Image (spheres, coloured by chain):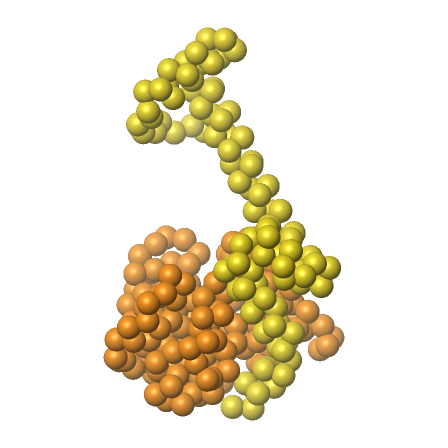
Amino acid sequence: MIVADTSALISLATADTLQLVLEEFDVHTTETVLEELENTAEYDDSHGNAAENVLDQREQLTVHSTEDPEIESSRIDDGEATCTVLVQELEAEFLITDDLRALPEIQALTDARVAISPIVSKALVKRDVLTHREAETRLDSIAETRDWLGAPIYRRAKNLFDGDK
Amino acid sequence: MGTTRVNFRLPDELVEKADVAAEVTHKNRTDIIVEALQDYLEEVEDDEKFKEAVIELYLDDQIGFDVLKEFIGRQDAESVRASKTLLDQGDELADELAEL
């Protein structure tokens, strides 16, 4: 069972991998994340289009309402906070987030494994449902949408697929 | 390249100085603002490329965490460090994930 936050769902949709992930894994999220996606979908840019793409596939997501987590942090937003609560409630094995700036705090808040979307792509390659070449190309599309902090990380994540060649 | 008319307010003092600069350099007010904005954008872009390059040095283990922190600040450096650790453990994490 995995819990995915807004940033993870948007990255997976940007990389055109979301449908595969939803077929392969039991993916859960929160109502707060859906609200964030609806707000993001209002924008006519790459993030907005990706959010709309996620919302088109919402039937395949299990959406939960959560208690107000009351986490005060400049780096963790409401969607991420509710996901850390949901992970505990469901005893999910993985929490997927692509908000790198929030990553250290999210890790501190949960006992679950925390992973970023390139690691999900790597798992899809291991399951033989995605080729390493497709995974690499899709990482490029994510890297293009990221700022100076994220872009080098996503470019470097391509090394994950070196061993598969 | 096309142009767009934009409306914004500038502090009086800045307009005065821009007009003096325009007079001295035989340019008009628009040229001055376009040049200043271009310089600013180049600087910001260079700065971001610089920060990306510093992060790449850290990912390559050529600089340590303390140096990274000097350039991009503690919080962002911690985010980069956490991301690097995830990438380093990526194969094992993907194994666990693939087995779910």
Picture colour for chain B: yellow
Residue B48 to residue A145: above or below: above
Q: Quadrant of residue A139?
A: bottom right
Which quadrant of the rendered structure holds the C terminus of chain A? Answer: bottom right
Chain displayed in orange: A
Residue A159 to residue B44: above or below: below
Front residue of B49/A46: it is: B49
Q: In which quarter of the image is residue A76?
A: bottom left
Describe residue A132's horizontal placement relative to residue A112 as left or right: right
Describe residue B63's horizontal placement relative to residue A139 as left or right: right
Residue A16 to residue B43: above or below: below
Which quadrant of the rendered structure holds the N terminus of chain A? Answer: bottom left
* Res. A83 visible in picture: yes
* x, y percent for residue B33: 44, 24
* x, y percent for residue A152: 61, 58
* x, y percent for residue B97: 54, 85
- Residue drawn at x 34%, y 60% is A40
Front residue of B33/A105: it is: A105
Describe residue A165's horizontal placement relative to residue A45 as left or right: right
* Res. A33 visible in picture: no
